[in-house]
Image: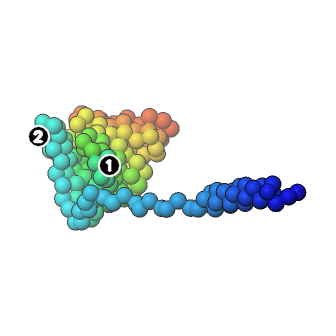
C-alpha cells in the first residue's frame, strides 16, 4: 500500500478509536449527586394551632421539631402531641414518634407508636387507641387505621385489625380479627 491511501485510513482509524475511547469514558462518569432539598423552615419547641376553612380550630400540635417541605408544602413532625377538638366539648389527644400533615391540614398521619385518647365518656372513662399508624381527618372528624389496634376503655380491652373512628359521635369500629376482654360496668 502506498502512503497516500494508508495515511487517510490511519487517520480515520485514529478518529474512530478516539471517539470510542471518549464515549467509554463518558459512560463511566458518575452524575453529580443532587443536593437534598432543604426545608422551607424548621421550627423547634413549637406550638401550632391550625384553623380549618371556616376559621375554627382544626387541631393544635406541640413538639420538639417541625419541618416544612418546599415542594408539597407538607409538614413533617418529630414526636408530636396533637389535640383535636371534639364536637360537644372535650378533646381527642394523640401522640406518636413522627407525623405528616397535608398541605391543607385536612389529613394527619400519625406514624410509629401511636396513642390516641378520646374525651371522657358518660362514665368518665376515656377510650385509648394504640397502633403503629393512624390517619386522622380533622375536617370530617374521622380517623382510621389498617393495622393492628388495641382499644382500652376502663378495664375492657379490645384488639383487632383495622379501625374506623367517628370522633364526632365518639364511636369506633374494629374491622377484623377482633378479640376482647370485657369488664363489667361499675
Graded by Cα atoms within 10 Å as few (under 14), some (14 to 19) or many (20 or more), the crowding at tag 1 reads: few
Residue 166 lies, in percent from the top left, at: 29, 35
104 sits left or right of 4 in the view: left
Q: Nearer the viewer, residue 125 or 74?
A: 74
Q: Quadrant of residue 140?
A: top left
* Residue in the image at 19% along x and 43% along y: 58
Q: Tell me the number on the disc at residue 55.
A: 2
Q: Nearer the viewer, residue 45 or 148?
A: 45
* Residue in the image at 44% along x and 59% along y: 34
Q: Quadrant of the C terminus?
A: top left
Residue 174 lies, in percent from the top left, at: 41, 37
Q: Tell me the number on the disc at residue 71.
A: 1
Q: Quadrant of residue 51?
A: top left
Residue 103 lies, in percent from the top left, at: 27, 44
Element at badge 1? Answer: loop
Residue 40 lies, in percent from the top left, at: 27, 57
Q: Nearer the viewer, residue 15 or 174?
A: 15
Element at badge 2? Answer: loop
Q: Is residue 167 visible?
A: no
Q: Is residue 145 visible?
A: yes
* Residue in the image at 20% along x and 62% along y: 46
13 sits left or right of 159 in the view: right
Q: Is residue 101 above or below residue 88?
A: below
Amino acid at each position: 500500500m502506498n502512503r497516500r491511501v494508508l495515511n487517510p485510513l490511519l487517520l480515520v482509524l485514529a478518529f474512530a478509536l478516539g471517539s470510542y475511547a471518549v464515549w467509554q469514558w463518558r459512560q463511566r462518569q458518575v452524575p453529580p449527586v443532587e443536593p437534598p432539598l432543604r426545608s422551607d423552615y424548621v421550627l423547634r419547641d413549637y406550638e401550632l394551632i391550625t384553623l380549618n376553612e371556616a376559621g375554627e380550630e382544626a387541631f393544635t400540635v406541640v413538639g420538639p421539631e417541625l419541618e416544612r417541605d418546599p415542594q408539597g408544602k407538607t409538614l413533617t413532625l418529630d414526636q408530636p402531641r396533637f389535640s383535636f377538638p371534639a364536637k360537644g366539648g372535650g378533646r381527642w389527644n394523640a401522640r406518636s414518634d413522627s407525623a405528616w400533615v397535608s398541605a391543607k391540614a385536612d389529613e394527619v398521619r400519625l406514624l410509629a407508636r401511636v396513642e390516641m385518647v378520646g374525651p371522657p365518656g358518660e362514665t368518665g372513662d376515656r377510650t385509648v387507641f394504640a397502633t403503629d399508624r393512624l390517619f386522622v381527618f380533622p375536617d370530617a372528624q374521622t380517623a382510621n387505621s389498617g393495622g393492628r389496634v388495641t382499644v382500652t376503655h376502663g378495664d375492657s380491652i379490645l384488639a383487632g385489625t383495622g379501625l374506623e373512628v367517628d370522633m364526632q359521635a365518639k364511636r369506633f369500629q374494629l374491622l377484623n380479627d377482633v378479640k376482647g376482654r370485657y369488664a363489667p360496668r361499675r
